[in-house]
Amino acid sequence: MLAETICSAASAAGLGIAAVTAYRKRFLAATRIAAYSLVPIGLVLTGVVEWVSGIAFKPSVWIGFGVLGLAWLLFMTTRAVERRSGTTRAERRAARAAERNEAVAPGASAPSLGAGSHARPAAAAAPPKPKKKQEAAAPGDDFSDIEAILKKHGI
């Protein structure tokens, strides 16, 4: 009951200020003030004020708002941590997909190419022929020096 009285008084005061503003021949401003002053009485007539006052005095409602606030805080914290780590959800999904697809086929001496990569010529796809140590590495054989180091260490 008190809230309805306060809203009615605020509307009456606003309409009075709008009348004074219109008297000063500032009709556009007076119309805007009248519109703002009619909002509280409109809220009372629609029942919104009674609903809000019913919510404001129930502890369970405030606990609900607290839980919603906690959920929002947790969500924002995870977003901040995600931004600091420098990875997005799409990047992590792509990394997981790359882990599932093996980069090197078992028993292969060179990395295999996926379907989306540049295709190798048919001659380069054939198994490599044994080379002598004196021959220089071909431009397409990028991993020969690495293979030699690994063989030297028994890996």
Image: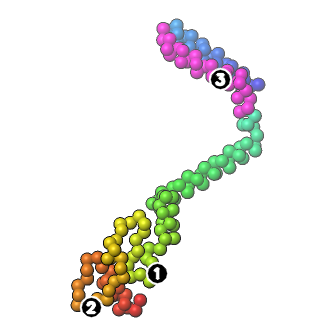
Mark positioned earlier in the residue sequence (1 or 3):
3
Residue at the front extreme of this rendering? 122
Q: Secondary structure at mark 1?
A: loop
Stretch of the chain drawn in magenta = 25-52
Q: CA distance from mark 1 to mark 3?
A: 75 Å
Queried whether the magenta region covers residue 49, the answer comes back as yes
Q: Is 100 or 124 nearer to us in this picture?
A: 124
Q: Quadrant of residue 111?
A: bottom left
Q: How is the image coloured?
A: rainbow
Q: Residue at x 23, y 87 (%)?
A: 135
Residue 20, given in percent of the width and then of the height, sits at 55, 10
Q: Nearer the viewer, mark 1 or mark 3?
A: 1
Residue 70, given in percent of the width and then of the height, sits at 64, 51
- Residue denoted by label 3: 40
Q: Main secondary structure of the magenta part?
A: helix
Q: Nearer the viewer, mark 3 or mark 2?
A: 2
How dense is the environment of label 2, judged by Cα within 10 Å: few (below 14), some, or many (20 and up)? few
Q: Is 129 or 152 nearer to us in this picture?
A: 129
Image marks 3 and 2: residues in contact by CB distance under 8 Å: no
Residue 128, given in percent of the width and then of the height, sits at 34, 83
Mark positioned earlier in the residue sequence (1 or 2):
1
Q: Secondary structure at mark 3?
A: helix
Q: Residue at x 23, y 90 (%)?
A: 134
Q: CA distance from mark 3 to mark 2?
A: 93 Å
Q: Secondary structure at mark 2?
A: loop
Q: Quadrant of residue 37?
A: top right
- Residue denoted by label 1: 106
**Horizontal side of residue 46 vs 93, given as left or right:** right
Image marks 1 and 2: residues in contact by CB distance under 8 Å: no
- Residue denoted by label 2: 132
The amino acid sitting under disc 1 is Pro
Q: Residue at x 51, y 62 (%)?
A: 93
